[in-house]
Amino acid sequence: MPDQADDKPSFWGGLLRRASVARRSSTKQSSVRTARLTYYITQPRNSSVADYAPKPRERESPYGRTNDSGTLSVSNPAADFVPTIAKRRPVPVPIDDAFPIARRRPRRPQSELDSVRPSGLPNRRPSATNGRAVRPTRSSQAWPPSGMSSSEELPPQHAHELIARGAPSHKGHKRPIPHATDEYYSIYTTSTGNRHEGTDSANLHDGMTQFMTMRMLSPGRSTKPWESLEQPSFGFYFGHLPGSITLNHWAAMASVMPPTIALRDSGVAPRPMSLERIFERLQELRFGLEDDDETLLYRILYKRILRDPDKILNPHKTLDKQITDLILVLSRPEWIDFTNPRNQVATRFIFDNGDPNDDRYRKFFHQLLLSLELDMRIQSQQHSDWAKEKLLHQIPPTIQWNLALARRWHEYVRVDDFGKTPDDILLRYKLKKRQIKMLKRFAQMMKWPNLADTLDNMKHKDSKMALDDISSDAFAFFSGLILPGASFPFLIMNTLLDLDPDSATDDLALLSHVHPNCGFQYRNSYTYWSYSCIVGKVLAPTCHSVAGWIGPARPTSDLGRSKIARIRSRRPKQRMGPEDVESMGERSDPLGPPAEVYPVDEYQLVSPRGMDDAVDTVRIELLSLKPADGPEEAAAAGSGPRLYDATVQFAIDGVSWPLRLMYDVSFVAAWPCSDGPHPLFFDYVYTSIRVDAIVGVRDWGNLYGGPQIHSVRSSPGPGMMRGPYRDLFSHSFGHGPSNGHSVFSGGDEEDEDDDEKVLVVEAFGVRDNEVLARAWCSHWGLSAVVADIRKTCMACAIREAYAATLTVVILVEGQEYSSNE
C-alpha cells in the first residue's frame, strides 16, 4: 500500500498540480498539412477558351501524377508555381475501403459556362482614379457588380469582399480520444463567416433540450462541441428547422469511438458510512467546500470518508492528492456504471426505498457523496480553467458521468432533513416550479388529447407534495436529477403519461430511450414520434419539434387506439469519412480553389423561382405501418411494442404515390448567411427541380450501384410521360436554374454521370411539399441539406451540401409553425 501511495501523485494529482502551478495558457501545437502544396496548386486563371480545353484525367501516384495513358509526370513543387494554366481542383485522394461513398473533389469536366466565355479578351482590372483602384460594391441582386465587366479578374482580397462576404465557411476537426489508440477519433465541425447571423442549431431553451447536454468544465452552454460530456454533443445536435440536425452532428456520426473498458480495481476502499452520516455531509456541502481551511478539509475527508495510507510520513493535505485518492476509490467496479444507457435514469436506484432496497439506496448516495467531493475539489478556484479542462478530459468516462450526476444534485437538490432511514429523508427540488411550467407547455404544444384532466391531476399531486412519488421517471424530471444524453425526451413523455389519469396510458408504459426509433398513437387522435425515428424526421414540417419529440402528427389506422410502434429502417450508405471532414474547408470554399486572381465570369448568382410558382397540388394522404416482425418475433414480444415498416402516401395532382421510409436518413439544417444572395463558383455542379417532379427521379447519384439506365437523370421514366402522369411532369422537368444546369436538359454526358452533382428540390408552399421531399430522400437513402431561403441563399446551401458530402438540397421558405399555432 505505501508503494501504491507513492505512485499516485505522479498521475492524476501530478497532472493537476503541475498544470495549476505552471502557466495558465498552453501553446497549442498547430497541425501541419504536409500535402497542402500538392492538394491545391494555386495558379492565376486566364480567360482564354483554350485554357479550359479538356485534358487527360490524372490520378494520384506516390511519386507524381499519372494520366489515362499511363504516362507518369513527376511533381515538382517549385515548377508547379510557374503561372501556366488555371488548376481547378485537387486530384482525388484514393478512396478508403472503409468509406466507399466518401466524396472527393476531382477536376470537373468542362462547364457550360466555359462555352460562353469570351476568347482573346485582355485581362482587365478596375479603373484607377488618382492612382487608387476603384472597387465596385456588389448589389445583392446583381452580378457582375455595377461598373464591373464579366471579363475582369479580382485580386484575392477584393474577391473575398464581393463573393464570400457573409457566406459561412466550414472547417472539420479530427481529435484524438484520451486513453485510446490512433484508430479511434472524434470528428467535429465549426463554421464562421456569416457575420453573427445565427447558427444552424436550435435554441436549447426554446426546444426544451437543455437537460440533454452538459459542459464538462463549468455550468453554461458549451461553446465548442468537444466541451460536452456526452458525445456526440446534444448541445450541437438539433437543427433550427423541425426534424433536422446540425452539420456538426452529421460529421460526428463518422467518429470512431472505442469500446467501453471496465476500470481496474484500485484496491482502495472508502470508509463504511451510514445513511445518516452520508446525508449529514451532503447537507454540509450545500454551502460549499472548505478549501480555505486545509486542516479542516483534510480531517473531514480522511476521518469520515476515506483512509489516508500516508498519514504518518506524508499526509494528503493538498487538493491534488485528495483528488487522486477519490479517483482511485471511484474506480472500484462495485459502483453503478452510468455510462451504460440502461442506468442513465438514475432515480430508478432510489425510487423504491423499501426494506429490500435499503442497501442499494445507501450505496447510491454513498457513490453520489464521493462524486460530489471529487467534483468540488476539481472545480476549486485554486485551479486554473486550463488545468481543470485538462484533467476532466483525462478522467475515465465512468468517473466523468459520476461527476455529471454530482453536479446535477449540487445545482438542483437540497437536503432539508435526514435521519437513519430513507423515510426520514426530506429533499427539496429547486426546479420543481419550472419543470411544472415546462411540462404544461410541452403538453399544450403536443395538443395532448386528455390535456385538461392531466393538468388537473398534476395540480392535485403538487398540492400534496407527491409529484416525486408517481414514478421514477417523474422523480427524475421534477427533481432535476437528469443525466445528459438521450434519456430526457423519454423522461418528459413518460412523466406526462404517468400524470394522465386515462387507463389507456397503461399500454404506453414501455417507452424507453434504449429503443429510441419509436413512436405511439394515443386515443386514435394523434401520433407522436421520437426525434431519432425516421417517421418523425419526415413528418416534422407538419408538427412541432420540442423536447426531443415530434408531434402532433397524423394518426394511422394500422395501430390500435393507444399503442407503441417501433420503426424498422436501414442504415444509409451515405456518410462522411475522416478525409472528407479534414478537407471540408477546401471543398466548400466560396471562392473555389485558391488562386492569384479570380475571374468574374467564373461566378454566377443562382436563385429559385420562389413562392410565386410554389406547388399546391401535393397532399399527404395517409401514414401506413405494416408489421415487420414474423410470427415468432411477434409471439416473443407478446403485448409489448412490435416492429413496423412505415410508408407515407401522397396525392400529387390527383395521383397517389406511396413512398416507403426505408432508410434512416438525416436532414441537415443549413447555416444562415448574410449579405446574400452570394455568387456560386461554376465548379459546384447542381440541378434544380420542383418538388412535384421528385418522384420521377430514381437512384440519384447512382448511390446503390444499379445500372445507370434505371436512374432518371436525363429523361423521365419509360411510362412517366404518358397517361395521367404527362401533365404532372411536363411542366416540371424542363425547369432549371438560370445557368442552364437542368436535370432533364440532356447536357454533357460526363456531367450527367457526375455522382457529386447536387439535386436542388424547391419545396416552397404548403408543408406537405417538404414532407414529400423528405419521404423521397428516405425512400432512396439520401440525406439532405434543408435550407430556409429567407435565411440561407441557394448558393450557400449548395456549398454546404458539398461540405457535408451530400447530393440533395431541399429549399423551403418559412414553413415552420407560427407561435400561435
Image: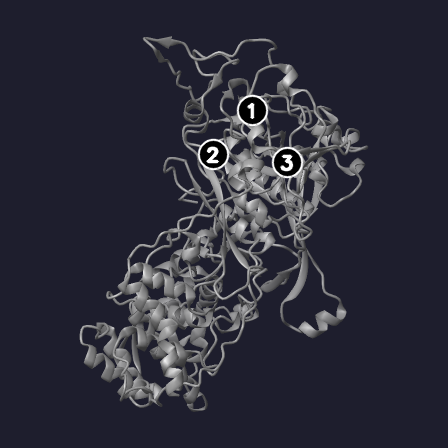
- From the image, tell me which residue sits under label 3: 91
What residue type is disc 1 on?
Val
Q: Are marks 1 and 3 in contact (CB under 8 Å)?
A: no
Q: Quadrant of the C terminus?
A: top left
Disc 3 element? loop
In the image, 6 versus 582, the foreground residue is: 6
Marks 1 and 3, how far apart in space? Answer: 18 Å
Q: In which quarter of the image is residue 753?
A: top right
**Residue 68 badge:** none
In the image, 181 versus 640, the foreground residue is: 181
**Residue 82 badge:** 1
Q: On screen, 307 above or below 401?
A: below
Disc 2 element? loop
Find residue 726 and report its horizontal and vertical position in percent.
75, 28
Q: In which quarter of the image is residue 70?
A: top right
What residue type is disc 2 on?
Thr
- From the image, tell me which residue sits under label 2: 792
- 2 or 3: tag closer to the N-terminus: 3
Q: On screen, 75 above or below 331?
A: above
What residue type is disc 3 on?
Val
Marks 2 and 1, how far apart in space? Answer: 38 Å
